[in-house]
Amino acid sequence: MNVVGSPSLEETFLTLPPGEREAIITHGTAIRLSNLRKRLFLAQSKVRHFEETYNTTLEVLENEGLPDDAGYALHEDYVMWRHWATVISRLTRDIAAMEEIAQRGLLGGPATDVSD
């Protein structure tokens, strides 16, 4: 919450020296990428489990439709399968964006080493 007359978070961040801003973004990007990749691994594992269980892919299942004799379990699994596929798509997009930030660095050049 921004108190009237106090600088915004962005304004406060911009008062830091450029090296500190770059260090924050570089370290934050690395941590965020690690978390996103872990979540992607989980989502891919879930999708792979459904593919192995039903011996098909979600794309084939959606193109052909659920079998007429599909039981409750397949319907429930389909909902979760679709969810995890959507998560993979979103995470893949987010990871690509974060990798672009990591490659370009804060000032549009290559990221520098920010270790002590």
Image: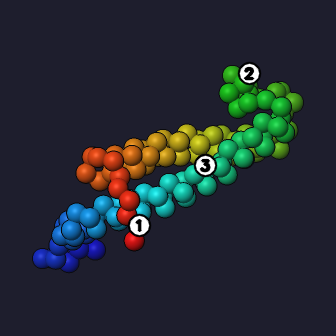
Secondary structure of the residue carrying tag 2 is helix
Q: Which residue was labeled with disc 3?
A: 40
Which of 68 and 99 lies nearest the eye of the viewer?
A: 99
- Residue 98 appears left or right of 49: left
Residue 69 percent across, percent down from the top left: 87, 30
Q: Which residue was labeled with disc 1?
A: 115
Q: Residues within 10 Å of mark 1 (few under 14, many from 20)?
A: few
Instruction: State the separation of the CA atoms marked 2 and 3.
Output: 27 Å
Seen in the picture, residue 54 relative to 29 is either above or below; the reply is above
Instruction: State the separation of the CA atoms marked 2 and 1.
Output: 53 Å
Seen in the picture, residue 12 relative to 86 is either above or below; the reply is below
Q: Amino acid at mark 3?
A: Leu
Q: Which residue was labeled with disc 2?
A: 64
Looking at the rendered image, the disc whose residue lies closer to the viewer, 2 or 3, is 3
Q: Furthest residue to the left?
A: 5
- The answer to whether one can see residue 62 in this image is no
Looking at the rendered image, the disc whose residue lies closer to the viewer, 3 or 1, is 1
Q: Amino acid at mark 1?
A: Ser
Q: Who's the residue at 28% across and 74% down the image?
A: 1
Q: Who's the residue at 72% across and 47% down the image?
A: 46
